[in-house]
Image (cartoon, coloured by chain):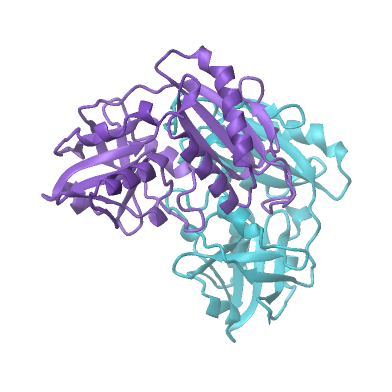
Chain colours: A cyan, B purple
Amino acid sequence: MFRLYWADEAGLPADDRGLAYGDGLFETIRMSGQRGVLLSRHLERMVRDAGRLGIEVSRKELANVCVEAAQRFADRFKADGWILKLTLTRGSGGRGYRPDPGMEPNLLVSASPMPPAPDSEGVAADFSKVPLAVNPFVAGIKSLNRIEQVLAAAELGPSLFEVIMADRDGNLVEGTRTNLLLRQGGGWVTPPASSLAVAGVLRQWLLERLRQRGETVTERPVTVNDVLGPDCQGLFLLNSVLGIVPVRTIAGHDLPVDSGLATIFNPLETLE
Amino acid sequence: MFRLYWADEAGLPADDRGLAYGDGLFETIRMSGQRGVLLSRHLERMVRDAGRLGIEVSRKELANVCVEAAQRFADRFKADGWILKLTLTRGSGGRGYRPDPGMEPNLLVSASPMPPAPDSEGVAADFSKVPLAVNPFVAGIKSLNRIEQVLAAAELGPSLFEVIMADRDGNLVEGTRTNLLLRQGGGWVTPPASSLAVAGVLRQWLLERLRQRGETVTERPVTVNDVLGPDCQGLFLLNSVLGIVPVRTIAGHDLPVDSGLATIFNPLETLE
């Protein structure tokens, strides 16, 4: 079980380990009324990745909180949707970094309006100056350790939707809040899950869907050349709240835009 | 300026970015009564590293808070000292990762008892299974992104004081809460500051002091062989709260213990 905090009532205790050490993880779920986009996948990822951090949480109890949150928040937002955020931390207190195995987790639940929709005809992106250093022990986990993404996001502006971060070998890993999917040679290419800071639920859903349709999906390191070279037939940014976003221009270089992929993912069809 | 929160009164707001993204940093200062060990260095590091994160804070206002905190907390603890913790975050709210330049930082101030003193005759250490992935953009900053240290600290136990984490090349970087100093060939060796997750204030103070005494200090990558090989004349763990801690045994391998170094640092002589 966990101790439940509603963000519209109170913050977490001052000795919460999520604040102290980033000792926790979060999910942001696009809601429409009282139902959520890819909700099961969000809950499954949180339970699985909490387990990787040694934080035990029941999927059923998380799901119950989502129902309660939907009843509480849905009416405060317009019909076009809202964002449900779950922040799960290891709990309060303890001596220094060392986690106490008997600790009761804290769960903070908050709601916010939908962000502005990205331009469906494509967005502008750039390569970030901030590299990504992914520790294999926490690769893919949407943990509360996001200072690299914050520093990279400082490069964003009104005319720059996303910046792509590279690892120390120069391979492109992901955007600050999006995973990458490249169209090349009639197939699809994406960096492998083991290399990612955050393995997104839309990315996983989309890879499965493409494979079900018989399309070729290759998980391998992606280079700047893959994106800027003549073989690139399109670059897409994936985020379960924002959807599948085509990149129209990157670092001033125009990319082919095909909005066909966006039609594969209709958020309203994945509501649960 | 910043918004001040006393941890014995309240936690931070639910939308604090320190909790949401680890968007902040902290200092833990050993206090004796109303004075602090290496206090100026702690404050200088916080101001400098906050600046690297784009968080502006005045050293003078931080120092004033320390005076206020000392008056508030000192009497609650015994004469052997206490710990003052400053947690500075970018502030509350904002849209996603992207930091708002006009944001007012939050400062959370808390106090806790001194941890148990390490065995002055030496402690047991081991090599951690958890690697460290240090991003050069945040190297050395005591940011709130400490999930790697938490996972490594889970390996600690009553008979294991510290575990040493290595980077992906296998070079030893630091302990979960300590920097490393090796005695070798009559001189001193320590991993370079640019490679560190946290560049400790005691480490910096000690390197300066050793150099003032005419001793040879080399900053270079440190390997497992440096520690386990015949040239190792001693391994020391550095932490401004715990002091200079000799390692008696690492991974079951006995090391020479010389307590001479510990006498260089007398915390009570560095009180400010």
Q: Quadrant of residue B93?
A: top right
- Residue drawn at the location 47% of the way across and 31% of the way down: B29
Residue drawn at (29%, 57%) of the image: B220
Residue at the spot 78% in from the left edge and 43% down from the top edge: A112
The quadrant of the image that shows the N terminus of chain B is: top right
Residue A231 visible, this orientation: yes
> Residue A269, percent across and down?
76, 54
Taking depth in this image into account, of B249 and A88 the one nearest to the observer is: B249
Q: Nearer the viewer, residue A199 or A110?
A: A110
Residue A142, visible in the rendered structure? no
The number of callouts visible is 0
Whole-percent x and y of residue B66?
57, 29
Of residues B141 and A252, which is closer to you in this image? B141
User: On the image, which quarter does residue B253 sit in?
Assistant: top left
Q: Is residue A267 left or right of residue A40?
A: right
Residue A62 image offset from top left, x and y in percent: 63, 34
Q: Quick check: A147 left or right of A96?
A: right
